[in-house]
Amino acid sequence: MVAGALMGAERTKTEVGTHNLIFNWRYPVNLIVSIGQYSSEDGTVSEDQMVCVADEAAYAKSAGKNCVVVKAPA
């Protein structure tokens, strides 16, 4: 399940980055995306906790920009 979600996140990041947002502009204007991902297979983590951990992963400055970060259960 996690591998499929990771592939979907990578595909989303790539797809978003290929679209030029402003046509007829001298330079292409593209978006970058950072996606944080977390899963709890045993169901002991609440939805709020999962969102919080995924947000931490998405905002991890060490990972850089335009990336997908997977946070493993502690």
Image (cartoon, grey):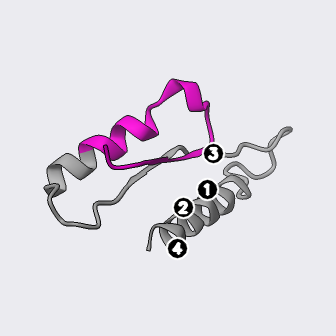
Spatial separation of the CA atoms under disc 4 and disc 2: 9 Å
Spatial separation of the CA atoms under disc 3 and disc 2: 15 Å
Mark 2 — residue? 9
48 or 43, nearer to the observer: 43
Count of numbered tags = 4
Residue at (26, 49) in percent of width and height: 51
Q: Amino acid at mark 2?
A: Ala
Residue at (72, 42) in percent of width and height: 29
Q: Which residue is situated farthest in the right direction here?
A: 26
Residue at (76, 52) in percent of width and height: 23
Q: Secondary structure at mark 4?
A: helix
Q: Write down the region rendered in magenta.
A: 52-74
Mark 4 — residue? 4
Find out whether the residues at labels 3 and 1 contact each other: C-beta distance under 8 Å. Answer: no
- Pair 3/1: label in front: 1
Which of marks 4 and 1 precedes in the sequence?
A: 4
| Few, some or many residues within 10 Å of mark 4 (<14, 14–19, 20+) | few
| Few, some or many residues within 10 Å of mark 3 (<14, 14–19, 20+) | some
Q: Eyeballing the image, is 2 above or below 49?
A: below
Could you tell whether 60 is left or right of 64 in the image?
left
Q: Amino acid at mark 1?
A: Lys
- Where residue 10 sits: x, y (%)? 61, 60
* Disc number for residue 67: none
Q: Which image quadrant is residue 64 in? A: top right
Mark 3 — residue? 31
Spatial separation of the CA atoms under disc 1 and disc 4: 14 Å
30 or 43, nearer to the observer: 43
Find out whether the residues at labels 2 and 1 contact each other: C-beta distance under 8 Å. Answer: yes
| Few, some or many residues within 10 Å of mark 2 (<14, 14–19, 20+) | many
Q: Amino acid at mark 4?
A: Gly
* Disc number for residue 13: 1
